[in-house]
Amino acid sequence: MYFCKMIKNDTIIALATPAGVGAIAVIRLSGENAITIADAFFKSIRKGKTLKNQKSHTIHLGHIVDNNNNNIVLDEVLVSVFKNPNSYTGENVVEISCHGSSFIQQEIIQLFLQNGCRMADNGEFTMRAFLNGKMDLSQAEAVADVIASNSAASHQMAIQQMRGGITNELKELRGQLLDFAALIELELDFSGEDVEFADRTRFKELVSKITLVLKRLIDSFSFGNAMKNGIPVAIIGEPNVGKSTLLNALLNEEKAIVSDIAGTTRDAIEDEIIIDGVAFRFIDTAGIRETKDVVESIGIKKAYEKAENAQLIIFLVNSQKFREENTTFKTEIETLKKRFENKKILVIANKSDLISSDETATLKSKIENLILLSAKNKTGIDTLKNELTSLVNIGALSNNETIVTNSRHFEALNNALIAITSVQQGIDLEISTDLFSIDIRECLRHLGAITGDYDVDKDILGHIFSNFCIGK
Ligand SMILES: Nc1nc2c(ncn2[C@@H]2O[C@H](COP(=O)(O)OP(=O)(O)OP(=O)(O)O)[C@@H](O)[C@H]2O)c(=O)[nH]1
Ligand SMILES: [Mg+2]
């Protein structure tokens, strides 16, 4: 493979567990000489036993002894041996489980660094796994997502991708397109002779199938991305309705300043919480009103921007407002709905503690689906949370569908769609084969970039793995 040039078969080492003190720490070595290097400093409790002569996937008790320095025993350890190619990286791998003191970890790592190992770069273990064909590029990228996942939903999506979700969707279609590409190229070789090797009906079917799959995957991205980064929910409304109080109640933390002065919040304040396994990112904004204050108007402009970029909008109002004639309020909701046409808007009446039970009943009968709560007393917050989770369609997740969460994949899918659309147009217009064969190759190239089956730029590869932590 193209990347093989990039593989250095030196032996790398890194701490696989978090830095700092713990009960146990794991130090990992990978490379052709990993086992030999470990053997030089590992003394088994069984005399004469060497790691080199042990089976793959076995664990051994012994000591790490610095034989360059008066045979000092650095620690009692358990060493796991994985032999090439049956390891995470596909190379010889040794994992040393030592006691979790920072001092011991550093002493052992230093010992190996001075004796044939090199410190691993970020993500180098996973990069080697990819380069050695243990996983494709999309799966390797998912490893970082699995480690970073902080909610059940983002975890499920990452695991799905690590197990080859997007690869499985695309591999067969790409293979079939590749076959057609070959046949069409063959036709070009016989261009003077009016032959047709590629069955046009089957080809058309394949092109529309690819278009369909690409569109579905592309559509899944906005959902996937929101699930991965937290679904943005903007809290907007007039000053003093209790937006900051609501944010604090949801987060269970005094994050935003609350006061009875209208116009307290100037800048947008946000934080994330997980509700039923789904991450939501709540954004408290400046109260919307006419103002001459320059800073406040900037805040208000920002509030609209935040609402624009959010997936859900909470429009918060003061329950007492309904005592007044409510036609203005209804127009406000209508205006808001027009302004944010494609967004889900939740209308919520706060300060329910300040109105009577009769008023509450009237209010509920007047306005459909109105949620009443008291942010200050933290009543009705659970109803709001339930409403939020029910608004998020997690059907795709429970059906185990492939959801695209990676922006590199999203871009490649979009480019592949542009190319396959050109192929489709070429077929419809019955243009000559040599013209659309370029688009077929273009589509193959973009599909291949996702899994790394095609030359992925060395810089892109470096970028992907630099986002990993060292040791993975
Ligand atoms: N009685 C009652 N008071 C509340 C409730 N929620 C908020 N308040 C009070 O209303 C006032 C305004 O609350 P904030 O949370 O600062 O309102 P805001 O919408 O963020 O206001 P701005 O930042 O100025 O736009 C404070 O005095 C809160 O204590 C509630 O549910 N019941
Ligand atoms: Mg506020």
Image (cartoon, rainbow, N blue to C red):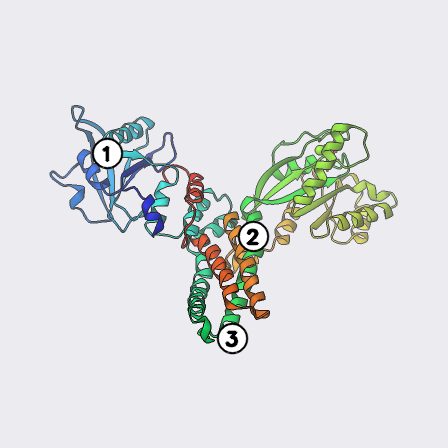
The residue sitting at 71% across, 48% down in the picture is 346
Image quarter for residue 304?
Answer: top right
The amino acid on which the numbered mark 3 sits, given as a three-letter code, is Thr
Residue at position x 73%, y 44% from top?
315
Residue corresponding to mark 1: 116
Which residue is farthest front?
A: 192
Whichever of callouts 3 and 2 sits on the residue coming sooner in the sequence is 3
Please identify the quadrant where the C terminus is shown.
top left
Disc 3 secondary structure class: helix
Amino acid bearing label 1: Gly
Give the quarter of the image for residue 176: bottom left
Which label is found at residue 221?
2
Camera-side mark, 3 or 2: 3
- The kind of secondary structure element at disc 1 is loop
Label 3: how many residues lie within 10 Å, few (<14), some (14-19) or many (20+)? Answer: few
Residue 147 in percent (x, y) is at 44, 43
